[in-house]
Amino acid sequence: MKIVFWFRGAILYFSTAWLMALSTQVQLRDAYLRVDAAPDDPLFTTYAAAPERSRFFADKAYFMDYFTPDKPITYSSQYAGEWAIIWKINNVVIQQTRDFARPPVVVASFPDMAILEYAPFVGLEVQEVFWVYSSGAARIQLFLKNTGSRDLNLTLYSVLHLPDDSLMAVDFIPDRGYLFTHYESRIRLHSNLYADRDYPTHFRNLLASQPRPVSFGTHRGCRFRDVYFAIKRKSKIHEYVRCLNERKSGPADFVLLQTDLHLKPGQSARVGFVRGVQDARRDVQELFTDVENALRADVQQQVIANEALFSRIPRISFRTRAERMVYLSAFNLVRQCILPPRGQTRYNYYVFSRNPIWGWGHGHQVMHESLSMLAYAFLAPPSAVASQRIFIEQQYPDGLIPYRVGPRGPQCYPHKGVGTTSAPFFAWTSWEVYRVSQDREFLKDAYQAGARYLEYLDRERDKDGDGMYEWGPYGIIENVRDGWNVVFQLFSEGEDEGRDISDELDALDLTCQVANEAYHLSLMARELGDREGERRWSRKFQQLKRLINQYMWDEETGFYYHIHMQTHRFDFEGHSLKRKEIIGFLPLWARVAPKDRARRLIQHLTNPESFWRKYGVPTLAADDPHYTPFVDGCCRWNGPVWLLWDYMVLVGLRNYGYERLARQLADKMMLAVSTQLRKNHRFWESYSPDFPVQESPSNYIWDAIMARVFIDLYLGESAFKPNSVLNHESRE
């Protein structure tokens, strides 16, 4: 038997044997990576190309919606439309997942790929693999099997939807596919893309399939439901219409390809669809090549590659399926943010998010975002080392590690003649990456860079020479906590971000961070056999410990605060600086708090009226008049939960033996993350401490710290022992 497709004057023959030869499903061999996620499970569902096939400009990552019952399974890329498959089976049009005979389940989820299983119709079993092959080509691979007792006539419509008046069909090329264009604004919700940095706005697209489509067409309308009615109407007229309108050019809201199959009971088939995208200024041949490569690529080999990628991670035996989903999702998040070397760096680097893309989150690394490497090192140690090496590569001769490093070179944003750095987490991150990678050359280089960096801070961030540190003149970004900060707001004079007084205070956070850097430099020196260096940095740590406890501890309230740089008092221009921020717990993280003071801090921490909130530890105590639990945008520090800072609190608890409280805090963090992943399948920059509703930048890289939270609490130090068995049945 042969199946004949009429295709623009040519006849393509696909024998049943040929179709069945291509019908083998992909196999997941590593059972640990099988998640079987239902629509309401806490699974991260954004996908981006592997680093080796990624590019910076015209990069398309996709968000998968398999959980909305009145839509098809859709894949959307920011401003680039939604892509889906609509089914017609024995003349029944099935668009909504609520109408499926069995709803979709995500069998496995990787940084660049999702494997789903479902039954759109009784007797039709489907395995769908979505794979972002490259920055310019994504593929939907369908493996179909008729498990019923009746023949099935199938019509599959590959549909691209972009209802904003920018979609324009250009041509249908028989040997290539459906060519169309669209426009994307550089305007973004949180931070616009930079007009002078070659971000494209005009894009060329290609929709292709294998086998080649039997028809093509466009449609106008604002909803997928409009396509449903258009397809259904073709089934209601007297003469059955086998083709779409085959409109080659013109404006559209939908472009469609049509593929027909006939499956007898027991027969199987495979159908592949690819959506390609490129900067319209590029040669169209590049688009054709990318799409063709995506169609020909071996999906099973990529599954094997993903299993190999995840083979290093600790195999924790979690208490719940939800914890394992969040754990794997956290690794997916950080891995898909990695891009290959380009521009002025020789090393792979990260962006804050691949989808969505916003200006300040795209293109350069910052030390506090690099705390995501504490988790990523367990997935891909050499890649984590490479990311840290950019800070070494682009460090200034005077020791300054600039605020941002990456493909455009070092970015230090001079302000009042002083270069800007970021919160100093370099030595800590580098030490933790080394503990996993065991790369001694990297450790040596990181130690030297970290030592030079602290020498720079001694010269440039301790203007009065009292041994404690002030943020630089551009402290509003240097201190990480941006502008929405209770201390700055005390001097806001009605302004949103407030007056920046961070270079007029001896800063508790910065001084603790320098102490933590000195502590980890001493560990590095010991590991490298540098006894003199170990003594030097141990003395530095002890000096800072003494100063923090002498000046920044308030016995009356039992908490740590900033102090006035000149007076060393807890007031500034008539306002009290005794505001209980999350940074008051950093002395636990930095190991500088005496045990009796640690106990008093724990009383504050565990008070539900101040810090012990439902979804974690807020950045400002709930009993402060400036506290707000509402996350209505980016950069909110007067209440929202920031996972990295909660992780530092968790580390501090473990430093002082409060393991039970650390586990309880981890559970709060898990609740914050899993609540959002269940609702919308995204990670977020920050989380509301009290409510499940929030708005902030989504898919933020540093939420990958959740993987490290689980490793710390389930495995502890055993995670760093070579050849150790990384399987624990439960937390004790």
Image: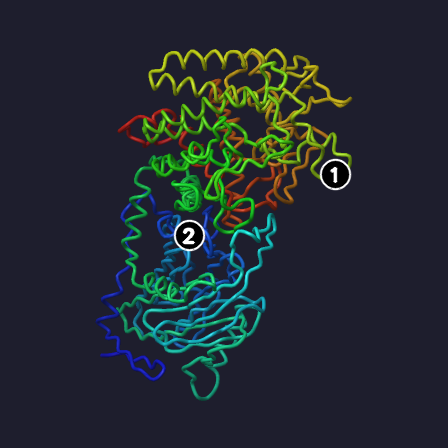
Task: Please report the residue visible at 70 percent of the width from the left and 18 percent of the height from the top.
Answer: 570
Say the numbered circle drawn on residue 55. 2
Task: Please report the residue visible at 38 percent of the width from the left and 27 percent of the height from the top.
Answer: 445
Q: Classify 10 Å Cα crowding around label 2: few (below 14), some (14-19), many (20 and above).
A: some
Q: Is 508 on the left or on the right of 332, as rendered?
A: right
Say the numbered circle drawn on residue 693. none
Front-most of 243 and 187? 187
Q: Is residue 271 above or below residue 37?
A: below
Element on which disc 1 rests: loop
Front-most of 401 and 67? 401
Q: Is 173 on the left or on the right of 490, as rendered?
A: left
Front-most of 214 and 200? 200
Q: Classify 10 Å Cα crowding around label 1: few (below 14), some (14-19), many (20 and above).
A: few
**Residue 668 visible in this rendered orientation of the protein:** no
Q: Is residue 115 above or below residue 662?
A: below
Q: Residue 569: x percent and y percent?
A: 70, 15
> Mark 2 against mark 1, which lies toward the viewer?
2
Query: For the residue marked with disc 1, what is the amino acid?
Result: Glu
Front-most of 221 and 575? 575
**Quadrant of the rendering where the N terminus is positioned:** bottom left
Residue holding disc 1: 495
Q: Is 260 on the left or on the right of 198, as rendered?
A: left
Give how far apart the Cα atoms at labels 2 and 1 are: 39 Å
Among the two numbered marks 2 and 1 on one chain, the one whose residue lies closer to the N terminus: 2
Query: For the residue marked with disc 2, what is the amino acid?
Result: Arg
Q: Are marks 2 and 1 in contact (CB under 8 Å)?
A: no
Q: Residue 224: x percent and y percent?
A: 52, 68
